[in-house]
Amino acid sequence: MQDAITSVINSSDVQGKYLDADALDKLTTYFTTGELRVGAATAISANAATIVKDAVAKSLLYSDITRPGGNMYTTRRYAACIRDLDYYLRYSTYAMLAGDPSILDERVLNGLKETYNSLGVPIGATVQAIQAMKEVTAGLVGPDAGKEMGVYFDYICSGLS
Ligand SMILES: CCC1=C(C)/C(=C/C2=NC(=C\c3[nH]c(/C=C4\NC(=O)[C@H](C)[C@H]4CC)c(C)c3CCC(=O)O)/C(CCC(=O)O)=C2C)NC1=O
């Protein structure tokens, strides 16, 4: 896993240079948004179950997916879906704190699309639910932190698509 700091240091190191203006700019942005990130992470962790529930209500509930024949039908599969959404929220929060998406590649997206395809989990509906989480989260943490979280929700969606 990388973060905004190790990522600029690593890329300066491979060139054998001190941090240039561009690298220092990236670090300044990261440090000045530190409080925003920590505040958002605190609010998200205190409200995670509600965020997931509201996102499901906005996107999946009462659709064919929750009826017989749908992939969320049966309590076991419904619970697996809720659990997956909670993973996406928690790992997006980690990535937002780190200011870097690499943790998503390593711990979430690796092999996920293949798993979903083999189990018949619909990717389009999953993307809709993640987009609904993005909206609900932005409503909770405000537009600036919401935009930052949105980067990582979108990253998961493109990794799945
Ligand atoms: C931390 C990293 C991580 C991820 C991301 C993860 C995902 C993940 N989701 C799974 C299943 C599943 N995922 C879903 C999800 C859904 N079905 C729908 O229709 C909805 C659209 C959607 C929710 C948004 C369902 C229903 C299953 C169970 C499918 C089945 O067993 O038939 C499985 C198969 C094994 C299992 O059932 O636990 C994995 C590995 N596991 C991990 O360890």
Image: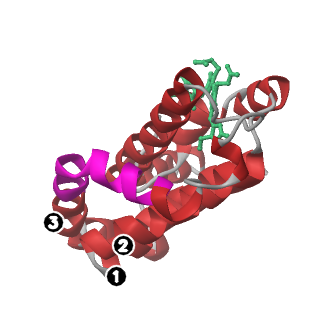
Residue 59 in view: yes
Quadrant position of residue 124: bottom right
Q: Main secondary structure of the magenta part?
A: helix
Precedes in sequence: disc 2 or disc 1? 2
Q: Which amino acid is tagged 2?
A: Ala
Residue 17 in view: no
Label 1 sits on a secondary structure element that is helix
Above or below, 1 against 28 in this view is above
x, y percent for residue 38:
19, 57
For ligand 1, tell me if the residue under mark 3 lies within 8 Å.
no
Residue on which disc 1 sits: 143
Separation of residues labelled 3 and 1 (CA atoms): 15 Å
> Mark 3 near mark 1, Cβ–Cβ under 8 Å?
no
Residue on which disc 2 sits: 138
Precedes in sequence: disc 3 or disc 1? 3
Q: Would you say 77 lies left or right of 123 here? A: left
Residue on which disc 3 sits: 35
